[in-house]
Structures are given as structure tokens and as C-alpha cells.
């Protein structure tokens, strides 16, 4: 393998009615399936489909294809009730127009408010700035039909802040990062 970002991994994949484990041959960079059963009895087996593929770092057009692919799949299962992604990104500024906080969030196509980042400059914390930013975005989300909000944080970041603002923990990863927890929260915005 080369340096990070420059490696290519090549795979061989074969699909039958039965599922085969894919094994990578040492040093070859090619994964091969174990010996396949006799497929001459067509009643018991589907046609074999062989595909060779590589895994490479993404370019912009690859990212778009991946996002479009998952959106197409998701929307084939549950119809959208809103645009695919509506950005709700705002900055809070002091009287001198200096950034003192902000939020990066948005509404997904099922109208859930997804909060990615909420930040407040250290000297402005515990003065209600974060709560005002959060409530501002929640209000806009509700006006646009959102019923739920979701986010994640770490125990050393804003766990108490979100609990105080009505968020309920729905899961956590203990020991990530080591000695800490990553916590997942949700909040019902409408009753």
C-alpha cells in the first residue's frame, strides 16, 4: 500500500444465490472468492455475475454520486417531505461584528433538524448565547415543519447544555475518545 490517499485496493466479487466470503490474496491486492459450487444445475443457482473493482480516494464527482446514490435508495423506501437538504447555518456577532458563536445545521428530506456544530467563543459561554442560537434554529425548523432535532456531542463538550435545553440521550459510545463518551441526542420539537 502507498501513502494515505494514494492507495488503490482491487477486489473481485462474485454473486450467487449462495453468499461467498471474499478473501484477499496476500500481496496481490486482489480478493478472490473460495471455490464455487457446481452451478450447472441452473434451477438451484442464479447466473454468476463477476465484477472487478478498485477502492480509491474520492473526487468531488465521486462524492456527488455516492450522495445521490444513497438519496435515491432512501427516497425509494420513504418519500421526501422536504428538499433534500435545507441549510440552517447562522453566525452570532458582537457589536464590533466579531464572530462569537454559530451553528451549522440543516433540515433533511424527512424534515428532521440535524445539528452538526454549535460553537460559542469561550468568553461568551454560560451567558445564554448558545441557548439563543439553538432556539433560533429550532424555531425556524419548526416553522418549516420539523418535528425532531438530532445531534451528537462529547461528554467534555456540551452534554449538560443539551440536557438543559430539553434533549434526551438516545445512545453513546463509551471510550471514544479514550476516557470519554460520544453521546447522541434527540429532541421532539413539536408535541
Image (tube, rainbow, N blue to C red):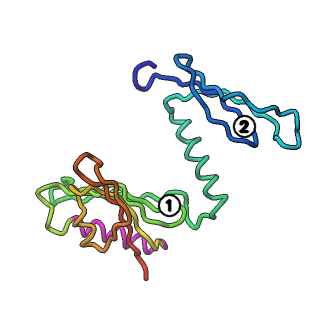
- In the displayed orientation, state which residue is furthest to the top: 27
Where residue 14 appears, as percent x and y from the top left, is 70, 33
Tell me: residue 20, above or below residue 95: above
| Residue 134 lies in the magenta-colored region | yes
Q: Quadrant of the C terminus?
A: bottom left
* Residue at x-position 27% and y-position 70%: 163
Q: Secondary structure at mark 1?
A: strand
The image quadrant of residue 113 is bottom left
Per the image, the residue denoted by label 2 is 15
* Residue at x-position 40% and y-position 25%: 4
Determine whether, in the image, residue 98 is placed left or right of residue 133.
left
Determine whether, in the image, residue 42 is placed left or right of residue 26.
right
Tell me: residue 31, above or below residue 47: above
Q: Secondary structure at mark 2?
A: strand
Query: On residue 108, which mark appears?
Result: 1
* Residue at x-position 66% and y-position 27%: 52
Bounds of the magenta segment: 130-145
Amino acid at each position: 500500500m502507498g501513502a494515505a490517499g494514494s492507495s488503490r485496493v482491487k477486489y473481485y466479487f462474485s454473486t450467487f444465490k449462495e453468499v461467498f466470503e471474499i478473501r484477499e490474496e496476500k500481496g496481490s491486492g486482489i480478493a478472490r472468492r473460495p471455490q464455487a459450487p457446481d452451478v450447472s444445475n441452473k434451477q438451484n443457482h442464479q447466473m454468476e455475475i463477476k465484477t472487478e473493482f478498485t477502492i480509491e480516494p474520492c473526487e468531488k464527482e465521486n462524492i456527488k454520486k455516492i450522495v445521490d446514490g444513497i438519496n435515491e435508495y432512501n427516497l425509494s423506501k420513504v418519500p421526501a417531505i422536504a428538499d433534500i437538504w435545507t441549510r440552517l447555518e447562522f453566525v452570532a456577532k458582537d457589536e464590533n461584528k466579531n464572530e462569537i458563536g454559530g451553528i451549522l445545521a440543516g433540515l433533511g428530506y424527512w424534515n428532521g433538524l440535524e445539528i452538526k456544530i454549535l460553537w460559542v467563543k469561550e468568553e461568551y459561554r454560560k451567558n445564554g448565547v448558545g441557548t439563543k442560537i439553538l432556539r433560533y434554529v429550532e424555531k425556524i425548523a419548526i416553522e418549516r415543519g420539523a418535528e425532531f432535532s438530532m445531534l451528537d456531542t462529547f461528554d467534555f463538550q456540551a452534554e449538560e447544555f443539551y440536557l438543559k435545553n430539553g434533549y434526551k440521550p438516545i445512545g453513546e459510545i463509551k471510550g471514544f475518545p479514550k476516557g470519554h463518551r460520544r453521546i447522541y441526542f434527540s429532541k421532539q420539537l413539536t408535541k
